[in-house]
Image: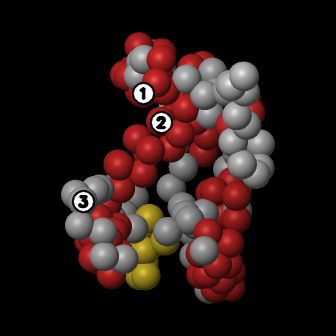
Amino acid sequence: MLHEQLGLARRVWAADVEAGQAGVEMPHALERKYPRAGASWAWFWVFPQDHLSTDPRSGVNRRHHLYDQTFQRAFKRALSAAGIAKPATPHTLRHCFATHLLQSGSDIRTVQQLLGHSDVATTMTYTHVLRMGGGAVRSPLDALPGEPANCAPKPA
């Protein structure tokens, strides 16, 4: 589905390029260092807005990303359509991503970098999933396909 979304976004980007649109706004230092980067596919939005907007500061007409409220409403509709009754938000996906990385053995610094946290203490809040006691310890054999190994001695 992500490949499909990227294909859709790329078609929107290509149409904007064809129409001579300005691309996306770049942070000021990057705009000075790479003046054409904002018009490149690499910087385009994964979830672009369906219309162009005029930047009130610069007067430039360009496409922006989906507003967070638009995405939140679509996420809520998707939960309902999937029959998921538990409360969830787009931020829940971020939390699950971090949690699953830690549960599968990723180191805390890698998770910190992927989440974009400047302070590892912020990332450490996700380590609660690692404090589940002896019952949560998994043997490397658990990851092997097939029936779980019975390592108990056979009765005499």
Q: Residues within 10 Å of mark 2 (few under 14, many from 20)?
A: some
Quadrant of the rendering where the C terminus is positioned: top right
Q: Quadrant of residue 151?
A: top right
Q: Which residue is drawn at 41% across and 22% down?
A: 132
Give the residue type that dot 1 points to: Val
Q: How far apart are marks 1 and 3 (CA)?
A: 19 Å
The mark nearer the N terminus, 1 or 3, is 3
Q: Label 1's element?
A: helix
User: Label for residue 86?
Assistant: 3
The mark nearer the N terminus, 2 or 3, is 3
Query: Which of 109 and 46 lies nearest the eye of the viewer?
Result: 109
Q: How crowded is mark 1: few (under 14 residues within 10 Å), some or many (20 or more)?
A: some
Query: Which of 65 and 137 lies nearest the eye of the viewer?
Result: 137
Give the residue type that dot 2 points to: Thr
Is residue 13 something one can see in this rendering?
Answer: no
Q: Distance between the residues labelled 2 and 3?
A: 18 Å
Q: Do the residues labelled 2 and 1 touch (CB within 8 Å)?
A: yes
User: Label for residue 61?
Assistant: none
Disc 2 or disc 1, which is closer to the eye?
Answer: 1
Where does label 1 land, which residue? 129
Query: Which of 99 and 26 lies nearest the eye of the viewer?
Result: 99
Q: Residue at x 63, y 21 (%)?
A: 107
Quadrant of the rendering where the N terminus is positioned: bottom right
Give the residue type that dot 3 points to: Lys
Q: Do the residues labelled 1 and 3 touch (CB within 8 Å)?
A: no
Q: In this view, does 131 lie above or below 15?
A: above
Q: Residues within 10 Å of mark 3 (few under 14, many from 20)?
A: few
Q: Which residue is drawn at 64% across and 78% down?
A: 4
Q: How far apart are marks 2 and 1 (CA)?
A: 7 Å
User: Label for residue 99?
Assistant: 2
